[in-house]
Amino acid sequence: MPRIVGVSRAKDLILTARVVDAAEALRIGLVDRLVALPDLEEAALGLAGQIAENSPEAVRASKEVIDAVLPLEPAARRELEANLTLRASEEHRRRFRDATQRIAGSE
């Protein structure tokens, strides 16, 4: 996330667990486009079709080059380790139950 929205904003979102709406997510670069739910499938298929029209080898090579510029493996591994540790804690289970009750109770 820091590479997408910047370190300061990533810390804001992660440390506060603040939820952003779709418009803010688009504004800060967290998403590339917004699509209304009724148009979602058509938009997804359209994007997939545009990609599929290109050479599979060129698409694969482009993805590899882009991924090589962003060496995320160590960070992803550390994030997984942290998540596994945190999710095993009683505090996490309690907070998750509380959040679930808040959401389920609001419907």
Image (cartoon, rainbow, N blue to C red):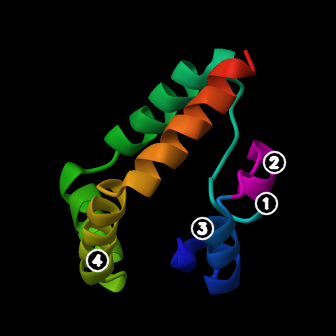
Q: Over which residues does the magenta segment extend? A: 18-26
Find numbered disc 3 in the image and state the secondary structure of the residue it sits on.
helix
2 and 1 marks in contact (CB < 8 Å): yes
- For the point 32% across and 70% down, which residue is it? 82
- For the point 73% across and 54% down, which residue is it? 26
Of tags 3 and 2, which is closer to the observer? 3
Residue type, numbered disc 2: Ala
How far apart, in angstroms, are the residues tagged by discs 3 and 1? Answer: 17 Å
Magenta-drawn stretch contains 44: no
How many numbered badges does the structure rendering display?
4
Residue type, numbered disc 3: Ile
Residue type, numbered disc 1: Arg
**Residue 58, how many percent across, how many down?**
25, 60
How far apart, in angstroms, are the residues tagged by discs 3 and 4? Answer: 15 Å
4 and 1 marks in contact (CB < 8 Å): no
How far apart, in angstroms, are the residues tagged by discs 4 and 1? Answer: 28 Å
Q: Quadrant of the C terminus?
A: top right
Find numbered disc 4 in the image and state the secondary structure of the residue it sits on.
helix
Find numbered disc 1 in the image and state the secondary structure of the residue it sits on.
helix
How far apart, in angstroms, are the residues tagged by discs 2 and 1? Answer: 6 Å
Residue at numbered disc 1: 27
Q: Earlier in the sequence, mark 4 or mark 2?
A: 2
3 and 1 marks in contact (CB < 8 Å): no
Residue at numbered disc 2: 23
Q: Residues within 10 Å of mark 3 (few under 14, many from 20)?
A: few
